[in-house]
């Protein structure tokens, strides 16, 4: 809105109108200026909102570059950031006869633009994100978030303009949740089922492991350790939940972690106490427990992680010998330095903590320690090391560490995750995927 005044005629013009009319005009001008000067409201897509339901399964929109874009940031830090493009998505769940469903949300950039995607629930909590690198004119960047059986409500789809000059195309689609067909190894359908804990125990920040020898699942949440046994002789399979918590790992905690060594079936539970942890391990899926030292000294005060695997050369262990065959690592972070300590006796005691990086190398949260089953190399991912996500690597059984940054993956929001299959290690960049919840 523009308000034009003629310097020579403004006074006479105001003099000729009645006082009340003059007041109304002044109020209108003040209101217009107030609207202009108000703090920026959240930038909206075109259209600014839409609904998906059983009868209206797909909605599309065009995302707009904000007036003052939050350039260089992969996060909107909330559902109402005016520096991001925000689309309000109302989800109406289908009829129960529809069965399990998902809502697939996607954004497609143009050219070499780099839009990142975040989805916030009706309460403003971040529930999904995607942050790929920029695409090309022939292969534009696509970001995707899938919500499984989301409850009814109005969600916010926020697009962060990391490096953009053009609008993007957005879509949300309500679809059946169907089994995924396996390729190459048969035709049996792969599907998932939900087995809620019938005892109603809090499931905050869970971690889980599987003893492949007994096929039992060990589940840790808060101060509770649970064992889940599945009966596959029925269809669908049934699950039995048992509380197998140990006294020293169910007293107090700042952070709960569970790890099961896939080679041996030994499960470790660690409860952070500050400078160290209360810990115990079991070789019979929680029937009996052995207390542990907890971790190495020095160690960090936050975000402890336990992992294990084969020793790397020149250290070797007989996998069938009387001594525990795998190395066990306890890692944690401080404000400026992170540490990892190695146990050579199956987690009963640990050696000294060794710095994996310093504040000059990295900051922020690290992920969980992983050991390569191929050669014993140890990996600890970090969400931010001088502007890039990275992984600290030890190729000598935790004696020394080297920070290796991942090209093209900017510093993330949360702790990343690394994995070490037999072929090649990889890092899942600053995202969270939890199968046990």
Image: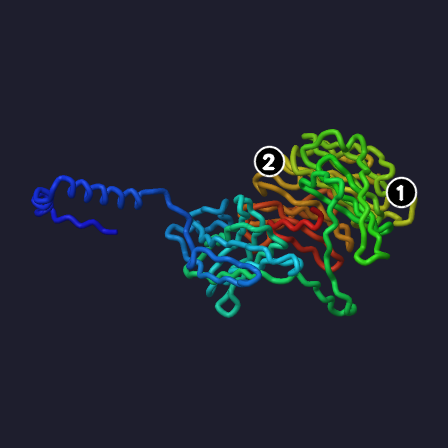
Circles 1 and 2, Cβ within 8 Å, touching? The answer is no
Q: In this image, 232 relative to 134: left or right?
A: right
- Quick one: 293 or 57, which is closer to the camera? 57
Image location of residue 138, percent across then percent down: 51, 70
Residue tagged 2:
336
**Residue at (22, 41) in percent of width and height:** 27
Q: Determine the secondary structure under disc 1.
A: loop
Q: Position of residue 201 (x, y in %)?
A: 72, 38
With respect to residue 254, does 416 lie above or below? below
Quick check: 31 left or right of 182?
Answer: left
Which of pointers 1 and 2 lies earlier in the amino acid sequence? 1
Would you identify the image quadrant in which residue 332 lies? top right
Crowding at mark 2 (Cα within 10 Å: few <14, some 14-19, many 20+):
some
| Residue 310 visible to an observer of this rendering | no
Distance between the alpha carbons at the discs numbered 1 and 2: 36 Å
| 329 vs 103, nearest the viewer | 103
Please state if 189 lies on the left or on the right of 346 as rendered: left
**Numbered badge on residue 323:** 1
Element assignment for label 2: loop
Which residue appears at 71% of the width and 45% of the height?
369
Residue 276 against residue 316 in the figure, above or below: above
């Amino acid at each position: 809105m523009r308000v034009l005044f003629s310097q020579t005629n403004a006074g006479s013009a105001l003099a000729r109108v009645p006082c009340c009319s003059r007041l109304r005009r002044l109020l209108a001008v003040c209101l217009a200026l107030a609207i202009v000067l108000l703090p920026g409201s959240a930038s909206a897509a075109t259209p600014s909102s839409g609904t998906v339901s059983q009868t209206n399964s797909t909605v599309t929109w065009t995302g707009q570059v904000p007036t003052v874009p939050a350039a260089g940031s992969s996060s909107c830090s909330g559902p109402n950031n005016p520096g991001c493009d925000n689309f309000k998505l109302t989800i109406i769940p289908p009829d129960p006869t529809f069965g399990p469903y998902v809502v697939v949300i996607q954004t497609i950039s143009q050219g070499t633009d780099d839009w990142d995607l975040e989805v916030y629930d009706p309460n403003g909590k971040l529930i999904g994100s995607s942050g790929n690198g920029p695409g090309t004119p022939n292969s534009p960047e696509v970001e995707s978030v899938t919500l499984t059986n989301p409850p009814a409500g109005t969600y916010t789809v926020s697009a962060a303009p990391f490096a953009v000059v053009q609008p993007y195309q957005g879509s949300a689609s309500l679809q059946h949740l169907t089994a995924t067909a396996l390729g190459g190894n048969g035709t049996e359908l792969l599907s998932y089922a939900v087995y809620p804990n019938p005892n109603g125990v809090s499931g905050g920040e869970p971690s889980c492991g599987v003893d492949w020898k007994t096929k039992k699942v060990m589940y840790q949440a808060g101060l509770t350790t649970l064992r889940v046994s599945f009966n596959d002789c029925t269809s669908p399979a049934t699950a039995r939940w048992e509380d197998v918590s140990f006294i020293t790992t169910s007293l107090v905690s700042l952070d709960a972690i569970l790890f099961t060594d896939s080679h041996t079936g030994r499960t470790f539970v660690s409860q952070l106490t500050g400078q160290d942890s209360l810990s115990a391990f079991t070789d019979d899926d929680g029937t009996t427990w052995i207390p542990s030292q907890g971790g190495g000294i020095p160690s960090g005060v936050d975000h402890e992680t336990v992992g294990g695997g084969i020793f790397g050369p020149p250290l070797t262990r007989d996998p069938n010998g009387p001594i525990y065959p795998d190395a066990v690592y306890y890692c944690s972070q401080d404000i400026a330095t992170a540490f990892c300590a190695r146990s050579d006796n199956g987690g009963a005691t640990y050696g000294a903590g060794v710095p994996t990086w310093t504040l000059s190398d990295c900051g922020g949260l690290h992920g969980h320690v992983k050991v390569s089953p191929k050669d014993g190399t140890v990996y600890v991912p970090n969400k931010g090391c001088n502007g890039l996500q990275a992984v600290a690597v030890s190729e000598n059984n935790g004696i020394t560490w080297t920070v290796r940054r991942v090209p093209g993956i900017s510093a993330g929001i949360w702790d990343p995750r690394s994995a070490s299959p037999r072929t090649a290690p990889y890092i899942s960049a600053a995202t969270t995927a939890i199968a046990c919840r």
